[in-house]
Image (tube, rainbow, N blue to C red):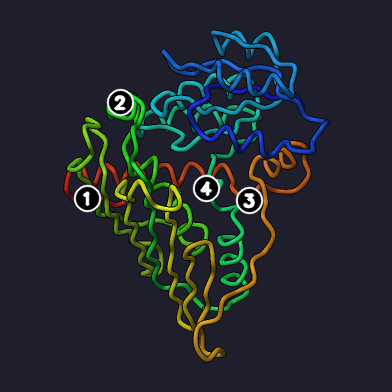
């Protein structure tokens, strides 16, 4: 399959890692997806392994190269526009999250998808980490019974972010960018749909990053009176041993499972004390997406889930802006 990259800002490493030891599928082109976005560094890196062309206009690239798959990973406020262009050409779309930074733009992408023949998945690659796949496996096997309560965390080091992070229009907000991962875990692990959200966020202590929110808290109500919270921050110290600190605790009516520091712990009615679980094998999200595009099974993240999580994140951001409860 022929693959092109639109942008070099998001998780393009998903594409590169998904193609390791894959000599059948090739990256054939790259172009910026946002004004002022520089793709030279990524182009030079990829040119060591692929015969690819660099374009200034991604629309011309799509028309000239006629790829099978396009990966969109530009400035977040431009995801939706690029996604629509890809879908209008019936090209399979692997798109960075959030798919859109406004509900109206999200509606445009959904309409283009409905009218296309394309496959679509958003880059919720943390699902594929062994510790999250392990939690999913045990929950689906009934280890904690019926999911009743979830508490998730996304914590990042702030560092010095690019200029586009400093404006809501181009960044989209910390809840959609950082928090959407944890919002996705809760939908995926519980199998429940969103009913309402109340959220808060703040730009205080953002170290001169303009409109970037550095802390946020979301409380979701799901179907069947299942509750889920997400705390999100850029407050992780610069000298921390890792960039991120991802955690989730899921309590069911028969036990509790926790993901913390890349390990999984279970306690339930059949176990005395907490037990660390053996991790399942790592998977690559883009390799999974390519198999799906080729008709070889289903992708772990569907188009419908991608859209719903994006909507949930945008509604949570709206709740924080308006300081009010929002019903789905």
Could you tell me which residue is drawn at 56 percent across and 53 percent down?
127
Residue 296: percent from left, percent from top = 78, 44
Other-residue count near label 3 (Cα within 10 Å), few / some / many at <14 / 14–19 / ≥20: some
Relative depth, front residue between 7 and 70: 7
How far is the residue under mark 3 from the one under mark 2? 30 Å
| Mark whose residue sits in front, 1 or 4 | 1
Q: Earlier in the sequence, mark 3 or mark 2?
A: 2
Res. 134 mark: none
Res. 300 mark: 3
Could you tell me which residue is drawn at 38 percent across and 26 percent down?
77
Q: Earlier in the sequence, mark 2 or mark 1?
A: 2
Could you tell me which residue is drawn at 57 percent across and 62 percent down?
131
How far is the residue under mark 4 from the one under mark 3? 10 Å
How far is the residue under mark 1 from the one under mark 4? 24 Å
What element does badge 1 sit on? Answer: strand
Res. 200 mark: 1
| Mark whose residue sits in front, 2 or 4 | 2
Residue 215, above or below 278: above
Relative depth, front residue between 13 and 202: 13
What element does badge 2 sit on? Answer: helix
Other-residue count near label 4 (Cα within 10 Å), few / some / many at <14 / 14–19 / ≥20: some
The answer to which image quadrant residue 231 occupies is: bottom left
Residue 317, above or below 129: above
Q: Mark 2 = which residue?
A: 169
How far is the residue under mark 2 from the one under mark 1? 19 Å
Q: Earlier in the sequence, mark 4 or mark 3?
A: 3
Residue 257, above or below 101: below
What element does badge 3 sit on? Answer: loop
Residue 34: percent from left, percent from top = 44, 17
Residue 309: percent from left, percent from top = 44, 47
Could you tell me which residue is drawn at 37 percent across and 65 percent down?
151
Q: Earlier in the sequence, mark 3 or mark 1?
A: 1
């Amino acid at each position: 399959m022929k693959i092109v990259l639109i942008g070099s800002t998001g998780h393009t490493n998903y594409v590169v890692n998904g193609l390791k030891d894959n000599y059948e599928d090739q990256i054939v082109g790259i172009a910026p997806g946002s004004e002022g976005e520089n793709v030279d560094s990524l182009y030079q890196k990829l040119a060591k392994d692929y015969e690819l062309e660099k374009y200034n206009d991604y629309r011309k690239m799509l028309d000239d190269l006629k790829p099978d798959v396009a990966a969109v990973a530009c400035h977040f406020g431009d995801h939706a526009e690029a996604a629509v262009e890809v879908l209008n050409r019936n090209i399979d779309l692997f798109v960075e999250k959030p798919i859109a930074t406004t509900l109206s733009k999200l509606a445009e992408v959904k309409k283009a998808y409905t009218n296309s023949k394309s496959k679509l998945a958003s880059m919720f690659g943390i699902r594929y980490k062994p510790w999250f796949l392990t939690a999913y496996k045990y929950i689906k096997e009934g280890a904690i019974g019926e999911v009743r309560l979830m508490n998730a965390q996304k914590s990042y080091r702030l560092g010095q972010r690019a200029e586009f992070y400093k404006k809501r229009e181009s960044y989209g907000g910390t809840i959609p960018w950082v928090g959407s991962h944890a919002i996705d875990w809760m939908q995926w692990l519980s199998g429940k749909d969103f009913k309402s959200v109340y959220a808060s966020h703040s730009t205080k202590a953002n170290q001169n990053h303009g409109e970037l929110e550095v802390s946020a808290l979301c409380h979701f109500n799901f179907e069947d009176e299942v509750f889920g919270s997400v705390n999100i921050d850029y407050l992780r110290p610069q000298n921390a041993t890792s960039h991120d600190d991802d955690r989730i605790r899921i309590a069911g009516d028969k036990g509790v499972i926790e993901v913390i520091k890349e390990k999984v712990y279970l306690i339930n009615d059949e176990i005395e004390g907490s037990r660390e679980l053996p991790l399942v094998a790592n998977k690559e999200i883009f390799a999974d997406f390519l198999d799906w595009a080729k008709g070889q099974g289903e992708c772990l993240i569907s188009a419908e889930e991608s859209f719903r999580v994006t909507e949930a994140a945008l509604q949570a951001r709206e709740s924080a802006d308006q300081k009010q409860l929002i019903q789905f």
